[in-house]
Amino acid sequence: MTAAATDVAGGPHRAPLTRLLRNELRWVLRRPRTQVALGLLALVPVVIGAGIVLADSPGGGLLTQVAGNGLVLPVAALSISLALLLPLTVTMAAADALAGESSHGTLRGLLLAPVGRGRLLGVKAVGVLAVAVAAAVAVALVGVLTGLVLVGGSDGLLTLSGTEVGAGSGLLRVGLAAAWTVGQLAAIGAVALAVSSATDHPLVVLAATLGAVIVFGVLSALPALEWMQPLLLTTGWSAIVDVLRDPLPYGELLSSSYRAACYLLIGLALALARITTREA
Amino acid sequence: MTAGSATVGSMTPSHGGRPAAVAPAIRVRGLRKTFGRAVAVAAVDLDVPAGAVLGVLGPNGSGKTTMIRMLLALSRPTAGTVELLGSPIPLGAGQVLPHVGALVEGPGFHPFLSGRENLRRAAAAEPLLSTPAIPAAVDDALARVGLTDAAGRRYRAYSLGMKQRLGLAAALLVPRRLVVLDEPTNGLDPAGTREVRRIIAELHAAGTTVLVSSHLLAEVEATCTHVAVLAEGSLITSGSLAAMLDGDAPLLDVRTPDVEGALDALCAESVGASAVSGGVRVELNGTDAPAVVARLVAAGVAVHEARRARTGLDELFAQLTEGDR
């Protein structure tokens, strides 16, 4: 037994984690569909900004606040994209991460190398997170630029509470909105990864995850199901507007982030449980 | 130099010629896999000596791929144990699999990356490759399968044969102790098939154990030292190729212009024989070649040539898989 074990030079061999991560990030960000999705997301604030400048009377809600108040634009763009476009982008990345690799037959290669299954999930989760960060940053960054160039108002931010804060504080608030958005997207990505670990079909991941987001939206609109509100991820999504209030109310932002953390943990735990027993 | 010593020489690497301490490269006991009620693999026992080239033969759906997937820890056996290179699978997969190269269920690569980029991605996951060694290992593997010229093209533009070659290259990224090739010649042209044979021969010469599955008998006959035949999930027979070809019911082909005379003479001795083109085929049951030739010569039949007819593996395979239906 010992002779046999030394046969294959004891101790498990592993490829360095940094190499795997670098490789994964390059693969995720070089993929044409990721680049197209990020490009389209970056257009969202541009389209909103142009629409507001061209229209005589701005649309309702948050958009009325954008006129002459450029730093509201990135927050409005994030809020609008979070409804569907950002979850779509992140879910797409999660669908490709495991189900897509499986349907291409490349998951087999990774497991045969071998990359340990737990490590594989970790690497994949980082790849999905990278897409979430890139997507939120793309919307926020292009939003800030468009806001300042098209809409104006570079000397500060007029808050929803009627006060005015400096440009630096305004940018910080946009950064906070982007970071909070990444948290919500990470939760969706984790759930999508769990679905992705259980199927060979990327389309199933997309349908299941986005279907859930839409169903959550419908459920939260039904008064009879009000008791369900604290359980739904989408409930806290209106909290992003809070970054535009003065003084900044943290309550909703925090509670929605905790909720996202719960979804994240559950999603990753399910994904781990599934991937360790998965047949590849 | 003599025929006898050549036979012994070809047998020893597989049987007893090596120190007994060397564990078999693959050791399978009672391996079974069921999907619901369907039995894909039923109680397979198999030993593959280190350094052998084992051909796993079987018609489509005979359980070849299912068995290979269990060997490589891609799929869990319903029952039974697997040892690769002396370590149990799947428990020791982390230690063993770096030494194992495999092409299973066709090549799997990303269509939007070039062949070289795909291999680099595969190489990044290989535990035995150091980061600086990756580019050279990738170029080397591409050269071995003859893909150097097409390495920069996107995988989506590859032909079936080129895809298969790239899959083979991924299995050869690192010097392996065991290489598992599931239907490696699928989609390859005759030149590609010859190259696969050459690659298997090179691996064999380097002391690598090779497991090749195929439904093409000629492939196995040309490249393998050992054969295992699967049908409907069961291992029908396994052993060294030479032993199987020499197996039971030996036949003697006798070339003679006097076919009728020969048949009469043998019939008189109640030795089974049948006419074939240019002579007779004699069943050597209860007799041997010199006795048959002596009998024929004594009966005045001109014997131009007499040699043992090897039952081609083709014939053997047909017998084994269709005989008992």
Image (cartoon, rainbow, N blue to C red):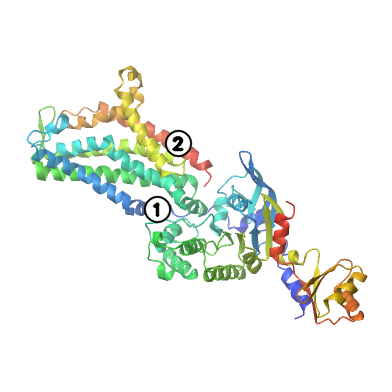
At x 47% / y 50%, what residue is drawn?
A107
Residue type beneath disc 2: Ala
Q: Which residue is mark 1?
A: A18
Q: Does the rendering let one see residue B18?
A: no
- Tell me if mark 1 has few (under 14), some (14-19) or many (20+) residues whose alpha carbon lies within 10 angstroms of its own: few
Badge 1 and badge 2 both on one subunit: yes
Q: Mark 2 — on which chain does it sit? A: A
Q: Position of residue A75 (x, y in %)?
A: 19, 36
Q: Which residue is mark 2?
A: A269
Residue type beneath disc 1: Thr
At x 49% / y 42%, what residue is drawn?
A275
Q: Position of residue B59 (x, y in %)?
A: 63, 55
A3, A114: nearer the viewer? A114
Direction from residue B18 to residue A168 in the image, left or right: left
Q: Quadrant of residue A187?
A: top left
B280, B71: nearer the viewer? B280
